[in-house]
Amino acid sequence: MADLELWASSLLLCFITMVVLFLIKSKSTSSSSSSSSLSSSLSPRRYPVIGSLPAITANQKRTIQWTSDIVRSSPSYTFVLHRPLGFSQVFTADAANVQHILKTHFFNYQKGSFSQSVLFDFLGDGIFNANGETWKFQRQVASHEFNTKSLRKFVETVVDTELSDRLIPILSAAAANGDVLDLQDILQRFAFDNICKISFGYDPAYLLPSLPEAKFAKAFESAVKISSERFQAIHPVVWKIKRFLHVGSEKQLRVAVEEVRRFAMEVTREKKEEQREKSSIESPDLLSRFLSSGHSDETFVADIVISFILAGRDTTSAALIWFFWLVAKHPEVETEILREINDKSEATIYEEVKDMAYTQAALSESMRLYPPVPVDGKTAMTDDVLPDGTVVKKGMSVTYHPYAMGRSEKLWGKDWAEFRPERWLQKAGPAGKWSYVPRDPYEYTVFQAGPRVCLGKEMAYLQMKRVAAGVLRRFRVVPALEEGAEPVFITYLTSKMEGGFPVKFVERATGGL
């Protein structure tokens, strides 16, 4: 039965290989004397039937970096990637195009059938995989959870409790013993506990000193990884055949999704029971709001639970690991953050993190270079033309590229490669204090923009600033990579450090600086 795993891809690969060999042989008999510009030299060669499959395959493990290089070398910051069997995909890092896609012609760029089918087994009809009324309903209900009162409660109770009772003691023990911890794993555990508490009123207690194994967490990670790999398949028929035959990665995905959904269903049923027992008391969490809205179908509510876990667990933890890495490499930035932390030490927790302009600038700068969601795609519902003249046909995939946009000289200047929080700041008031200045959301697309702009943007910043302040006030974070090694940026549905982020923690003297 295991041999059947190869059958789905082998049939297609045999045909494609023969075509590629024929085309390469044909090309070798002719030469071109014309010189190529930087743009054309980076653009992959296109063949009949198979499109740019050889280049796509050669760059499969660095797709984000490869497409970023191509799009940034294009005069229009846009190019069309031709996949096998006539499937074309537009990539753009042009701000005017992004505004056109995410706002001006929002109605024409939706989650298409391709993307929805790839993610449906995992996300179902959750907010990140839905369009139309289903999406509007979820967004409307969720929006009530992001008012000032809820944000204050989130920071002062959920985040601070998890920080002081769980995260800091673990880091303190590691510092005392000289242990190396995987900060990526630690922060995912921290974020998972946080999102479950605030959204579902449920504490999974995943961040404990023993760092317990959790079937759900492992299954969730597997489901994210395999679902994202479907996007890289030579053709959707490959993973669909494997799913039909229940073999290989598709078998693993089914097992993982069953575990994830079992967890989501249990959380939903427990919340229903709690509502029955406390029918006269309004529960404040997100899951209670959805159940009270009249949508009690457990499958649909489970879709919602899974989507919000994905949003709360993977994005903030991804942002924070790159933040700590960059701060460790730039001691002058760390000094400024510590100065800000000490200046605000007398403020309440909420007021402290709300007004941490320099720390927010450093977080924004790290996400510019290492966005938690490095690319995001839509599908054109009708024929269209982008502002730069790119023709888009109905059914084409159109992908805007936050990773490439963060590296755009046009948007950020010749020093775009520098980690410089000051580019987000200006001096304000007679005391000359820093004031945070946000960028145009269509130039800085880390939180998306337009009608689908991230509802949890402010919540994410508050959480990240509280973690940054809590950790850096007490410890120096020292990367424990091999000498000369750099972490590798990889992405599934969100970005990660390949192999984790090993670090040591060194206790600071009283006063921080």
Image: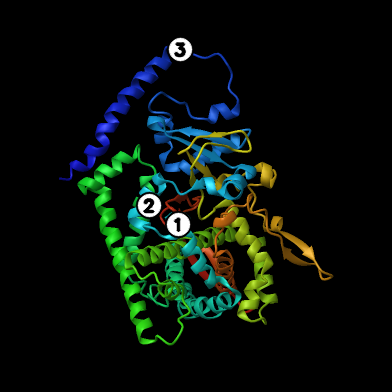
Q: Earlier in the sequence, mark 1 or mark 2?
A: 2
Name the one closer to the observer, 324 or 22: 22
Separation of residues labelled 3 and 1 (CA atoms): 48 Å
- Amino acid type of the residue tagged 1 in the rendering: Phe
Instruction: Evaluate if marks 3 and 1 touch, with contact meaning CB atoms under 8 Å apart.
Output: no
Q: Residue furthest left?
A: 1
Name the one closer to the observer, 282 or 408: 282
Q: Secondary structure at mark 3?
A: loop
Q: Position of residue 243 (x, y in %)?
A: 25, 47
Q: Of the numbered discs in the image, which one, if any, rests on residue 128?
A: 1
In the displayed structure image, the side of residue 513 where residue 128 appears, left or right: left
Q: Quadrant of residue 180?
A: bottom left
Q: Earlier in the sequence, mark 3 or mark 2?
A: 3
Q: Quadrant of residue 335?
A: bottom right
Separation of residues labelled 1 and 2 (CA atoms): 9 Å
- Amino acid type of the residue tagged 3 in the rendering: Ser
- Amino acid type of the residue tagged 2 in the rendering: Leu
The residue carrying pointer 3 sits among few (fewer than 14), some (14 to 19) or many (20 or more) residues within 10 Å by Cα, namely few
Instruction: Evaluate if marks 1 and 2 touch, with contact meaning CB atoms under 8 Å apart.
Output: yes
The residue that mark 3 highlights is 30
Quarter in which the C terminus is drawn: bottom right
Give the residue displayed 54% in from the left and 53% down from the top: 371
Q: Position of residue 269 (x, y in %)?
A: 32, 75
The residue that mark 2 highlights is 119
Q: Earlier in the sequence, mark 3 or mark 1?
A: 3
Say which of marks 3 and 2 sits in front.
2
Q: Position of residue 53 (x, y in %)?
A: 40, 31
